[in-house]
């Protein structure tokens, strides 16, 4: 049995703690906030078992120009962020080239292929089934041309990977979702995905399970890490020092900042997303993705959650919820909803790696230092799977194609 201090109480950190705990290790979680209050709180809550390929950087010239000039609502770039993001974005572009992207997608599918079972095991163990809706999610298109493109992808996914979906006409879509008040060209219903009505609450439920099984959760801010003759010291804001054998960095977008003083540099792209809850008399029966608005309309326990695409901005810069405002205007054409529940929008950071794969495993040449972060847009989906993989690595799993692909070694 080994000691592990996990830094980060999001979906990745908490599920990693549970996996290590199950493996017989002694585990403590440290975070400045309560479990599930950062990016794990603010996502769309979808376990996207249908995502057979990660989000690639656009390669077509017209798509690149569209991004550069901010013509869509899916991605917005701040000029001030580009100097620090230039190298990671360049690597992201290169990794999205067809041959390299196919190789990455093969690894990605091996992770995604386990996510449903890994989630279901935790859901059952924590008694959290009441937080889930198993009706898939629907991708709605206002333009027939875009619907045809997505329908072709859905058919390819069915033939190549066995992903279940169906194409909905406007009439079928309106029948499935009576809350809709405008017509669409049609939609793709991804049937195998499931969604959570309270993602932050789910992480808190998992954290409660961790405590019941004998784990310790410490709500403190980590100031620095030092490595004495053996093991590690975690220096906390209150002046305390905690000793442990192993450190696991599972802080999402904050991970590179804690690693840098240790001589470990990670080329992360931090993408900010926004959401806001609104009062609504009728909620959708499952998450609805309005492609033209680049927004998800999610039924949550707090009301209708409206989530946006990505904003590449300077880390920890002032919020600029322009995409959310635009999405709200377009959403009001689709669904009737009332005033906002919160006084201002929520914002959080997605930790995206240039090769679209998470960073999972031991840092070479620094004994006892481990990583589990960088899940991009799929942290909620992949958290339990990367946690299981991490626990297997900590238990001596032999190196293979997947562990090599996600290892921190690739960036060092």
Image (tube, rainbow, N blue to C red):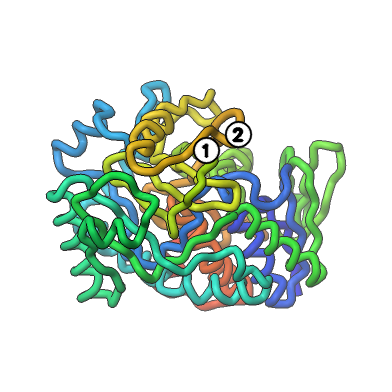
Estimate the spatial distance between the alpha carbons at disc 2 and disc 1, rounded to whole Å: 7 Å
Horizontal relation, residue 247 to residue 151: left or right: right
* Image location (x, y in percent) of residue 291: 29, 46
Mark 2 secondary-structure assignment: loop
* Image location (x, y in percent) of residue 197: 55, 57
Say the numbered circle drawn on residue 276.
Answer: 1
Q: Is residue 80 above or below residue 399?
A: above
Q: Quadrant of residue 93?
A: top left
**Is residue 152 something one can see in this rendering?**
yes
* Image location (x, y in percent) of residue 380: 51, 57
Q: Is residue 307 above or below residue 80?
A: below
Q: Residue at x 28, y 52 (%)?
A: 140
Q: Residue at x 28, y 28 (%)?
A: 70
Residue bearing the label numbered 2: 342
Mark 1 secondary-structure assignment: strand
Horizontal relation, residue 374 to residue 98: left or right: right
């Amino acid at each position: 049995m080994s000691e592990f201090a996990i830094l980060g109480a999001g979906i990745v950190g908490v599920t990693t703690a549970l996996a290590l705990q199950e493996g017989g290790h002694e585990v403590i979680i440290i975070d400045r906030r309560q479990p599930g209050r950062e990016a794990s709180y603010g996502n769309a809550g979808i376990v996207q078992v249908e995502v057979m390929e990660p989000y690639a950087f656009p390669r077509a010239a017209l798509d690149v120009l569209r991004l550069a000039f901010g013509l869509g609502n899916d991605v917005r770039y701040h000029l001030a962020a580009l100097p620090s993001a230039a190298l990671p974005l360049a690597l992201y572009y290169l990794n999205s080239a067809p041959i390299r992207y196919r190789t990455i997608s093969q690894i990605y599918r091996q992770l995604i292929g386990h996510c449903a079972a890994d989630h279901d095991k935790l859901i059952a163990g924590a008694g959290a089934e009441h937080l889930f809706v198993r009706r898939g999610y629907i991708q709605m298109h206002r333009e027939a041309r875009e619907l045809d493109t997505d329908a072709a992808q859905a058919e390819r996914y069915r033939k190549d990977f066995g992903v279940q979906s169906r194409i909905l006409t406007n009439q079928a879509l309106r029948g499935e979702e009576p809350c809709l008040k405008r017509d669409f060209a049609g939609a793709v219903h991804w049937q195998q995905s499931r969604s959570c009505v309270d993602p932050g609450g789910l992480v808190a439920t998992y954290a409660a399970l961790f405590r019941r099984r004998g784990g310790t959760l410490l709500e403190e801010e980590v100031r620095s890490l030092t490595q004495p003759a053996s093991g590690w010291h975690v220096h906390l804001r209150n002046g305390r020092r905690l000793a442990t054998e192993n450190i696991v960095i599972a802080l999402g977008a904050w991970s590179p900042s804690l690693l840098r003083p240790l001589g470990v540099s990670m080329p992360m792209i931090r993408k900010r997303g926004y959401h806001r809850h609104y009062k609504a008399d009728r909620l959708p029966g499952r998450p609805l993705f309005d492609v033209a608005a680049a927004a998800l309309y999610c039924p949550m326990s707090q009301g209708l959650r409206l989530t946006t695409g990505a904003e590449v901005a300077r880390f920890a810069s002032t919020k600029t919820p322009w995409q959310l405002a635009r999405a709200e205007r377009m959403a009001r054409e689709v669904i009737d909803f009332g005033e906002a529940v919160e006084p201002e929008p929520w914002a959080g950071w997605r930790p995206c790696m240039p090769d679209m794969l998470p960073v999972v495993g031991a840092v070479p040449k620094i004994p006892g230092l481990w990583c589990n972060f960088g899940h991009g847009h799929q942290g909620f989906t992949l958290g339990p799977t990367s946690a299981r993989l991490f626990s297997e690595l900590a238990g001596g799993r032999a190196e293979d194609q997947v562990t090599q692909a996600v290892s921190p070694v690739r960036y060092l």
